Amino acid sequence: MQMVIGGWVSKTISEITQLHVPDLVKKHGPSTALELVERHGVRAHAPSLQRALRACASLGLFTEDAESRYGPTPLSDALTADSPVSIKAITEIFGRSWYTVWGGLGDALRSGEPQPKSRLGAEYWDFLRSNPKEMEEFGAAMKANSNGSLRGVLELWDFTGVKTVADVGGGFGHLALALLAKYPELRATVLDMPDLEPIVRAQLPSDPGVTARFTYQGGEMFADVPAAEVYVMKHIIHDWDDERCVALLQHCVRRMQGDGRVLCVDAVLPPAGDTSGTAAKLLDINMLVFIPGKERTLAEWTDPYRAAGLRVGHVLPIRDNFGTSIVEGVRA
Ligand SMILES: C[S@@+](CC[C@H](N)C(=O)[O-])C[C@H]1O[C@@H](n2cnc3c(N)ncnc32)[C@H](O)[C@@H]1O
């Protein structure tokens, strides 16, 4: 039953996070639902909020005393905006448009078709393009989810000596900017949708030593990619079917300078018969319901790489939320 009611848990945590309760109890200390509403401006019906907080405390998210005061814990801290491991933005989106799309999972299983068109009125990337607020929230969610995988790339891949990197579908540029901060000789270009550019510009770090080496290129990644020695595509390949992936990888191979590399950062599922990798397998269901993408086993990575003129080199597992690895592509 705990698994069956997992959807209740996810939705309740999302709603509490959208009301900024974790931030408020971190700032003001243990509070009752009434105090949160009357003193700290939470827009909720206090008795109902109290019931949700009681359930969350039972899950270990908050402390609870005999006066029904709810206080912060290390778990609620991860749901606050200023935590170094914040997953606030992705938790919020789980309970909003993503929850709506997941309502179509049964239809996706029956038809094999992504559900944003029937649930949100458009295919997912088009839905984001025509809803700037959603696009910003999605970008923030991806950035939040990147905390772990970003650290893993910085720790596991040595960019010493590399002059240029292109982060294709690099979102807000969080990975590229972290690489630039670590490697002073590196220049980085992020290619992503043109509509993201103003948000990326508004969030650039103040260090001119970093920003001077950063380029944002708004464009269509299936049309072309910028020239670079190393291509990074983090959580991109899992968004697309094999045909699109081969096209994208071919662009990278064609534009790759010198003895370059393509570094895809995505899950590598264990082979059939190995029941580990639960988080990545659930992420695969997320792909199923949203877009024509999927998570891949090593064998399923090999085929698109080969078709694009690459071979799979090192596969380096990153310890993040979704069992992600760096899958190195070397010119064949
Ligand atoms: C799953 S997100 C990954 C973002 C980022 N790489 C990360 O790991 O946080 C996919 C990204 O691909 C971008 N994208 C989708 N379709 C695109 C296209 N046709 N051309 C350029 N970027 C695209 C989205 O805007 C989004 O930022």
Image (tube, rainbow, N blue to C red):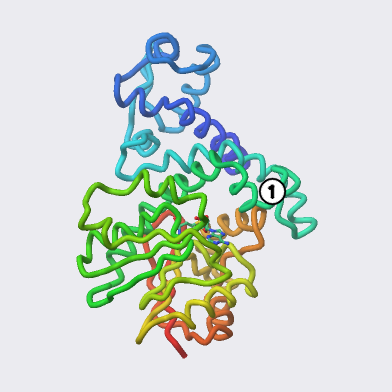
Residue 182, visible in the rendered structure:
yes
Point 32% across, 60% down: residue: 214
Q: Residue at x 20, y 65 (%)?
A: 184
Q: Residues within 10 Å of mark 1 (few under 14, many from 20)?
A: many
What residue is pinned by disc 1? Answer: 116
Q: Is mark 1 within 8 Å of ligand 1?
A: no
Q: Looking at the image, which is closer to me, 48 or 150?
A: 150
Q: Position of residue 40 (x, y in %)?
A: 38, 15
Rendered location of residue 223, percent (x, y):
57, 70
In the image, 305 versus 125, the foreground residue is 125
Closest to the observer: 268 or 80? 80
**Which amino acid type is shown beneath numbered disc 1?**
Pro
Q: How many marks?
A: 1
Residue lying at the far right in this picture: please name it: 110
Q: Image quadrant of residue 68?
A: top left
On screen, residue 27 above or below 2: above
- State left or right for residue 147 relative to residue 54: left
Residue 332 in the figure: left or right of residue 319: right
Q: Is residue 46 left or right of residue 202?
A: right
Q: Secondary structure at mark 1?
A: helix
Residue pictured at 41% horizontal, 32% vertical: 61
Q: Is residue 275 above or below residue 97?
A: below
Instruction: Give the image location of residue 319, x and y in percent.
Output: 37, 60
The residue positioned farthest toward the bottom in the image shown: 332
* Quarter containing the N terminus: top right
**Residue 129 location, x and y as percent?**
59, 49
Relative to 141, is 253 above or below? below
Residue 279 shows in this picture: no
